[in-house]
Image (cartoon, grey):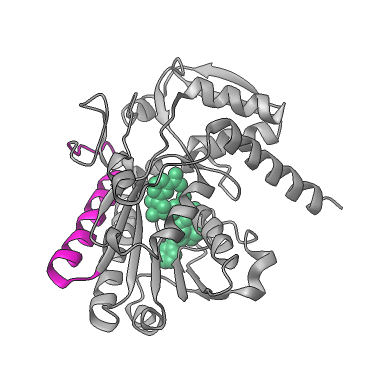
Amino acid sequence: MKILILGGAGFLGTNLTRGWLGNPDAQVTVLDSFDNRFQSNKKSLDDVWEKISVVRGSILDERLLAEIVPQHDVIYHLAAQSSHTLSLKQPILDAEINCLGTLKLLESIRLFHPEALVIYPSSTTSVGKAEEDIIDENHSEKPLEIYSANKGVSEKYFQIYNLVHGLKTIVFRFSNLYGPYGKASAEFGFINHFIYQALNHRPLTIFGSGEQIRNVLYVGDAVELLMSAAYQPQLCGQLAQATSPHHHSVRQIAQTIVETFQSGHVVYETWPNERKRIDVESVRFSSEKLRALTGWSAPTDLVTGIRRTCEILLSSESRERP
Ligand SMILES: NC(=O)c1ccc[n+]([C@@H]2O[C@H](COP(=O)([O-])OP(=O)(O)OC[C@H]3O[C@@H](n4cnc5c(N)ncnc54)[C@H](O)[C@@H]3O)[C@@H](O)[C@H]2O)c1
């Protein structure tokens, strides 16, 4: 099976690339812009470089897409501007990559390879604040910032291309992925940021009381789902939330990280205004639709996921030490 991972040098992409490398039937190509603005970890694929094809390029390049798309059976569209805060500072850049890039990809599949399966990770933040106790796929969508608005728009593009053009599309909505190869910067998600703060014996700063409830998913669970989706035709045309059955307060998440790494400490600060305005507050999600379609339920709980991340990060740190 020929696998194309767009944005394969990012956090989720690196983990997915490594996941597919465990399948002897898979030939993996990674296409990534390796754009410094998104703090891509250029070294994260160093040790597997020889086992994959790597293309440095942009999903905005229609000629490149026309050439590369027809060569693959399964296409993961992970190329993105993925920072909520950056999307407010550079909204046009966000729309170019997250909306126009998605459209260019879908057009290239429609024109040059309509048999391909294309899988898209969207975000639960496209929903915004909770208007129900439990959020499912029928919940209203009132995103609080540009990134989440554009993820919501992209989801609709996928569904339209399935409905109108018959493309084989699958959309999952993930929330707060964490695990190895994440980005240390707070701009790209709080859990991976907390993990690197603990790893480097620095404070983990919580805005507000830390009582806000979040859903978090170990990246390995997301990878297994994304890989198994390639073999599940009943998912074509679907949009489904893929969240953990467990919910935790931000305080609990931070404390679990500090206890597991035995390093770092939690501090509390008042919310900066610009961050408070885009905070979704407490949210609880259901993955019942996905469970009914496939039997999927996220297997890894928070303590296990943080422990695995800690083991992987500490072992790669000790390997890199002279
Ligand atoms: N990380 C999460 O918690 C999370 C949650 C929900 C959804 N998602 C989605 O999953 C996908 C991957 O997220 P991530 O956390 O790995 O993000 P990431 O920022 O780590 O990876 C995105 C990758 O896309 C690349 N890229 C950006 N613009 C490109 C372009 N024009 N052409 C080619 N490559 C380009 C970047 O260089 C980067 O390597 C995104 O669509 C994101 O919205 C992530």
In the image, residue 129 sits, relative to residue 61, either above or below, namely above
Residue 180 appears in the picture as rendered: yes
- Circle count: 0
User: Is 151 part of what is drawn in magenta?
Assistant: yes
In the image, residue 250 sits, relative to residue 103, either above or below, namely above
Determine the residue located farthest toward the left in the rendered image. 164
Question: Can you tell which quarter of the image residue 58 is in?
Answer: bottom left
Residue 282 is situated, as x and y percent measured from the top left of the image, at 34, 24
Residue 54 is situated, as x and y percent measured from the top left of the image, at 55, 74
In the image, residue 110 sits, relative to residue 238, either above or below, namely below
User: Is 124 part of what is drawn in magenta?
Assistant: no
Determine the residue located farthest toward the top in the rendered image. 209
On the rendered structure, is 257 left or right of 90?
right
What secondary structure is the magenta-colored segment mainly?
A: helix
Residue 175 is situated, as x and y percent measured from the top left of the image, at 39, 40
Residue at 39% x, 69% y is 75
Query: Which residues fall within the magenta stretch?
Result: 140-167
For the residue pair 187 and 255, the one nearer the viewer reads as 255
In the image, residue 11 sits, relative to residue 236, either above or below, namely above
Residue at 27% x, 44% y is 289
For the residue pair 61 and 113, the one nearer the viewer reads as 113
On the rendered structure, is 46 left or right of 296?
right
For the residue pair 233 and 136, the one nearer the viewer reads as 233
Q: Indicate the quadrant of ligand 1 in the picture.
A: bottom left
Residue 81 appears in the picture as rendered: no
Residue at 71% x, 27% y is 263
Residue 27 is situated, as x and y percent measured from the top left of the image, at 53, 76
Residue at 30% x, 55% y is 171
